[in-house]
Amino acid sequence: MAAAGDQEQVVSLSGKVCLVTGASSGIGAGTALLFSRLGARLALNGRNEENLKETARRCEEFCDQKPLLVPGDLTDEAVLRGMVEQTVAHFGQLDVLVNSGGILAMGGIEDTTLQDYDRVMNVNVRSLLFLTQLAVPHLIKTKGNIVNVSSVNGQRSFPGVLAYCMSKAAVDQLTRCAALDLASKQVRVNAICPGVIITEVHRRAGLDEAQYTQFLQRTQHTHALGRPGTVEEVARTIAFLASDAASFITGVTMPVDGGRHAMCPR
């Protein structure tokens, strides 16, 4: 039995090379920071280079090796190819891919334009599929894994966010299919499905301050735990699935939503 103060660190990413998209803000940035504390070597992608540099600066307080920055738009195929190529060239391997980059667009069946639909699906699904395909040969070599950031919107239906719900349902199905495709090669694929998390994504989608405040207040009733979640709470779940602590888990779409997925209107 381990002596007090000498317990095994259950969740560790020590030495693992992790590529995280969407790391310039929100869940992606929080994940990068936690991964650095858990010993990961990081390659970070985001669209906002200044914010991405700030994420890297915060990670450097914990990293033995400075994060590699691979900025760019996820809809650009050349950017995606470069991300994987630069990561492997720099670190010599790839162990974990975290697909955190994504966008939210408002609109229901009556007012979602094809342009909005294409934009959401291209960022949230098409880029994720292609980046996964590019990463898989390297993940097979390391028996690595993938964690996709989906949403409770992929498991439950909500009005006014049609394209977003469709995109996250596609991410959930991609996760399960890829997990089965890659299981024989010992590459795990999982997804986390957050509920309402305090980030900038809703403001970027168009909610003003009053609307956003009301939106957060509604979580008292829409989430069983009666509050929104934090980036740190989501990041801890991503870290668990990315670590060897989850070595027998694949193909799951894990809610991190304060119980919202289990609720029904009454």
Image: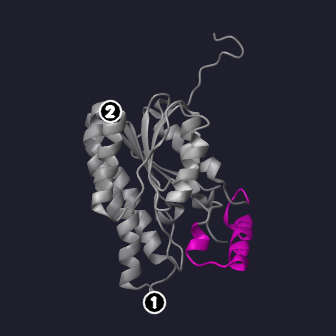
Query: What residue do we see at 41% from left, 72% from top?
Result: 120
The answer to whether any part of residue 20 appears in the image is yes
Q: Of residues 133 and 182, which is closer to you in this image? A: 133
Residue 25 magenta-drawn?
Answer: no
Tell me the residue at 28%/43% (across/down): 136
Query: Was residue 216 drawn as part of the magenta stretch in this picture?
Result: yes
- Residue 99 lies, with reference to residue 212, above or below; the image says above
> In what quadrant of the picture does the N terminus appear?
top right
Work out whether residue 21 or residue 213 is closer to the camera in this orientation and state it: 21
Q: How is the image coloured?
A: one colour
> Callout 2 environment at 10 Å: few (<14), some (14 to 19), or many (20+)?
few
Cα gap from disc 1 to disc 2, whole angstroms: 49 Å
- Which residue is disc 1 drawn over? 110
Q: Is residue 185 left or right of residue 161?
A: left
Residue 5 against residue 36 in the figure, above or below: above
> Is there CB contact under 8 Å for labels 1 and 2?
no
Where is residue 172? Give x, y as percent.
41, 57
What residue is disc 2 on? 92
**Where is residue 147 drawn, in percent x and y?**
44, 47
Q: Secondary structure at mark 1?
A: loop
Q: Where's residue 157, x and y in %?
A: 51, 71
> Which stretch appears magenta?
201-226
157, above or below 12, in the image: below
Left or right placement of residue 72 versus residue 221 in this view: left
Considering depth in this image, is 220 or 49 the residue closer to the camera? Answer: 49
The image quarter in which residue 171 lies: bottom left
Q: Seen in the image, is 41 located left or right of residue 140?
A: right
**Mark 2 residue type:** Gly
